[in-house]
Image (spheres, rainbow, N blue to C red):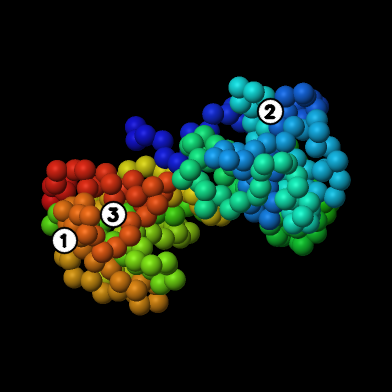
């Protein structure tokens, strides 16, 4: 099994079987050990180089006016954890919520966090993001209400009654290999000289492996085969599940999709190891970087 990637490896028991027990959930929220993971305008509360939490026993006043009820995340060795959307607070109120802590974009600090904290904060932000976008029923437009400790939004229209569940968007990301080189690309709008793996969302009616073949051909004109699974990573920007693959190409000729890609090149291992590399590789917390690093560390590409 591949080592756990950033944003995975949460050290909590989600206790999904308890979410329907309103009495049990209320007891967890009311316990002295309960903690709140606050989210404000999509940002996470951090103190120093780690996550900051609020004691639930001291945060009841924050529930008044909150856009939604606390969302049960699970239980760790210290007690129960709940996410709470505090986006209704003013910037000043949010800034003064806890001394020596402030709200920051998770994307900007995630690489500084230990994996379990990055995973927990992304879980909280993910659930708050989903809740904010499902306050109204997509089937009839009527308001929804929280069920199962925040993991279900139920339509309040008795003639509709649709239940909405949290979703993740599956996306494939792949290192394409050809003659001991790998294909990396710079997408339009990306900063600087950042180059990464080709990637794209899985479309309805196709497997992840089919999505790899389609996306590579659409973006680069390259036809691939021998698609092999590597690992998955939850990617909370805002709610994707990245499915990592390697794939082989028989031809290195490129025909770029100039709507999406500004540049794409084949790189050897020596080029990617070189201190004089003229591109920037992806962040270390990404599956893209893990795919590339694993490929570099191989002595040679997979057999053709």
Total labels drawn: 3
Q: Earlier in the sequence, mark 3 or mark 2?
A: 2
Query: Which of the 4 quarters of the picture holds residue 248?
Result: bottom left
**x, y percent for residue 224:** 24, 59
Give the secondary structure at mark 1: loop
Q: Residue at x 25, y 53 (%)?
A: 247
Q: Dot 3: few (<14), some (14–19), or many (≥20) neighbours within 10 Å?
A: many
With respect to residue 138, does 245 lie above or below?
Answer: above
Q: Which mark is residue 175?
A: 3
Q: Dot 2: few (<14), some (14–19), or many (≥20) neighbours within 10 Å?
A: many
**x, y percent for residue 23:** 81, 27
Judged left or right of residue 14, residue 89 is: right
Disc 3 to disc 1: CB gap under 8 Å: no
Q: Residue at x 58, y 29 (%)?
A: 12
Disc 3 to disc 2: CB gap under 8 Å: no
Q: Nearer the viewer, residue 12 or 225?
A: 12
Per the model, the C-alpha gap separating discs 3 and 1 is: 14 Å
Residue behind mark 2: 80
Per the model, the C-alpha gap separating discs 3 and 2 is: 40 Å
Judged left or right of residue 223, residue 17 is: right
Give the secondary structure at mark 2: strand
Give the secondary structure at mark 3: strand
With respect to residue 115, does 211 lie above or below?
Answer: below
Q: Earlier in the sequence, mark 2 or mark 1?
A: 2
Q: Residue at x 50, y 46 (%)?
A: 110
Per the model, the C-alpha gap separating discs 2 and 1 is: 53 Å
Judged left or right of residue 300, residue 71 is: right
**x, y percent for residue 302:** 17, 46
Residue behind mark 1: 250
């Amino acid at each position: 099994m591949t080592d756990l990637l950033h944003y995975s490896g949460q050290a909590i028991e989600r206790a999904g079987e308890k979410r329907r027990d309103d009495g049990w959930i209320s007891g967890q929220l009311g316990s002295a050990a309960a903690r709140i993971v606050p989210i404000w305008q999509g940002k996470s509360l951090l103190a120093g180089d780690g996550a900051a939490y609020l004691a639930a026993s001291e945060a009841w006043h924050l529930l008044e006016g909150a856009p939604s009820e606390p969302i049960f995340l699970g239980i760790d060795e210290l007690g129960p954890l709940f996410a709470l959307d505090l986006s209704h607070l003013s910037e000043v109120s949010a800034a003064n919520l806890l001394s020596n802590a402030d709200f920051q974009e998770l994307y900007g600090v995630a690489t500084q966090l230990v994996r379990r904290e990055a995973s927990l904060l992304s879980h909280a932000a993910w659930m708050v993001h989903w809740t904010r976008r499902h306050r109204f029923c997509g089937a009839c437009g009527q308001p929804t209400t929280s069920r199962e400790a925040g993991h279900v939004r139920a339509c309040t229209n008795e003639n509709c009654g649709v239940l909405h569940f949290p979703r993740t968007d599956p996306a494939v990301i792949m290192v394409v290999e050809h003659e001991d080189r790998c294909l990396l690309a710079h997408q339009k709008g990306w900063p600087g000289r950042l180059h990464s793996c080709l990637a794209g969302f899985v479309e309805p009616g196709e497997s992840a492996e089919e999505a790899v073949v389609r996306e590579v051909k659409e973006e680069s004109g390259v036809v691939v085969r021998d698609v092999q699974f590597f690992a998955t990573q939850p990617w909370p920007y805002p709610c994707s599940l990245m499915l990592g693959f390697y794939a082989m190409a028989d031809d290195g000729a490129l025909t770029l999709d100039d709507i999406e890609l500004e540049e794409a090149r084949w790189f050897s291992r020596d080029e990617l190891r070189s201190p004089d590399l003229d591109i920037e590789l992806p962040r270390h917390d990404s599956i893209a970087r893990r795919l590339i690093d694993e490929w570099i560390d191989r002595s040679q590409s997979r057999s053709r």
